[in-house]
Image (cartoon, grey):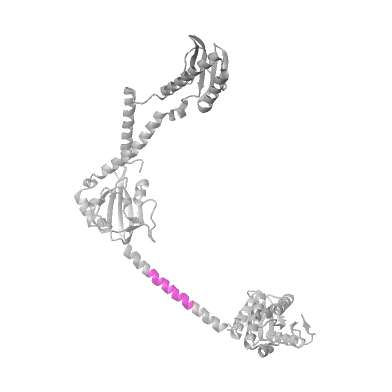
Amino acid sequence: MRGRSPLVWISLGLVSVTVSLVLLSNALFHVAPDEAQQIYQYRKALAETLAGQFSQLAQDGNLPAITEAMRVLAERDPTIQSVALRHGVREFVAQVGDHQRYWLMPPGDSSTLDQIRVPILKGPDRWGTLELAFRPAVDGGVRGWAQSAWVQFLGVLAGLGFVGYWIFMRRTLRQLDPSAVVPQRVRAALDVLTEGIVLVDPSDVIVLANRSFVERVGIDAQSLLGRDLCDLSWVGTRHAPLPERFPWTDSIADRQIRVSVALGFRASDQTERLLLCNCSPIRDDRGVVRGALASFNDVTELEQANEQLLGALKDLDASKEEVLRKNEELYRLATRDPLTGCFNRRAFFEQVDKVVARAVERGTDLGVLMVDIDHFKAFNDRHGHAVGDQVLVAVAKTIQSVLRAEDVLGRYGGEEFCVVLDGVNAYLLGEIAERIRRRIEIESGGSVRSVNGLRVTASLGATLSVDRRHSNIPVLLEQADQALYEAKRSGRNRVCVFQPKDAPSAAA
């Protein structure tokens, strides 16, 4: 409901007339009860009843009974601030509450809405006065005015009247034929268009719908007229979620054009259609927006064709990914040792060439390790080749766990592995080699679960390039192999670093 809708102004006008009639009737015929007078009569009657009871008690001198009755009355009636029984003019014989604070009336016999007094008689003579001080019955200011029952009644009447008049006028106006103001030649021209065309008023009520839109929604033209365009069978779909506000509503609200807004619609045959909506506000000669023109293009078949194309592209991508996966698998089979997962001998040397090129570019030293499992033939002879294979796998995993990401590990022979490391010095190379040896001794045997207590050790030979040209990898491999032979000869399960022939051999 928009503030500028004629329905709102008509409803407000009818509510104003209704409230004015009620106020006029009350002024002429006093149909509304006087709330203050009713309260005064109730309080006066209460005071007179108490005065009748207290007269006999006062004559008997039973002041405690009077005081107790006052206390009970004050507790049960929260509007009472204080009660006092005055003997003569000034003397108080009984009181409840701070009467001197709340009693504001001067001496005499008059009463007000909040200050009630009744004489107490002893025979034909006046014995005293009963005085009751009440809380103010009507608050002053805006708050008191708003809490008035009469004002609240008028407020409820205005609110409910507005809603009732608005609903009544809305339904009444819908019974009129809004398309009568559209010339016949204009409607005939719109019916020729293949796009669905709808004219709506500022309240989104359909004024005109062409033949294409009627056929698309499956509702006859007369039934569409007077209906709210927002109340048709719009649905949320995968491509068009149901909007919070429809484009024609926004176009009327902000006076802006809306283009290619996707909307889902459930047709009369229960099929879901995808419509593209374009909206433009309609202005009169003074620039006031009088409604909107909405056009609808059915792009359901186009979207289905796009989905089929996307499906084909996905299938193509899946096939491509499968080919890549197969190629990767073939590459792994071609470059990896099938048992240990290390590079095979051919792939190992291809990777070494890359490491050498990187070392030359960076100007770093290369280290080479040869790792050989001690007494490997005994594992096969004593426990079988299956256990020997488990030992090979365990040792390969142990070596890999120590190496860095850029180091290259290959299976060089039956039970022999080779490692090429870039960016190492003599100390780091020896540290890595010793760490590999210790882990093989500690961990590898426990990885072979089919044989309890199996002890696996390895011997390692290490060498470091002495220049930075790295032009002869086979020489480094030969040096590492000589160091490995020295480790085997000197007792196994140790690391030996290659030493030139003119230098004494050393074991790490």
Residue 104 vs residue 502, the one in the foreground: 104
Asked whether the viewer can see residue 471, the reply is no
Residue 243 vs residue 157, the one in the foreground: 157
Quadrant of the image containing the C terminus: bottom right
Q: Is residue 209 above or below residue 77?
A: below
In-image side of 19 versus 54 (left or right):
left
Residue 323 shown in magenta: yes
Asked whether the viewer can see residue 93, the reply is yes
Q: Residue at x 51, y 16 (%)?
A: 56
Residue 316 shown in magenta: yes
In-image side of 507 versus 471 (left or right):
right
Residue found at the very far top of the displayed protein: 125
In-image side of 213 versus 360 (left or right):
left
Look at the image and give the residue range highlighted in magenta: 309-324
Q: Is residue 96 above or below residue 476?
A: above
- Residue 466 image point, x, y percent: 72, 80
In-image side of 424 versus 72 (left or right):
right
Residue found at the very far front of the displayed protein: 60
Q: Residue at x 22, y 54 (%)?
A: 189
Magenta span dominant secondary structure: helix
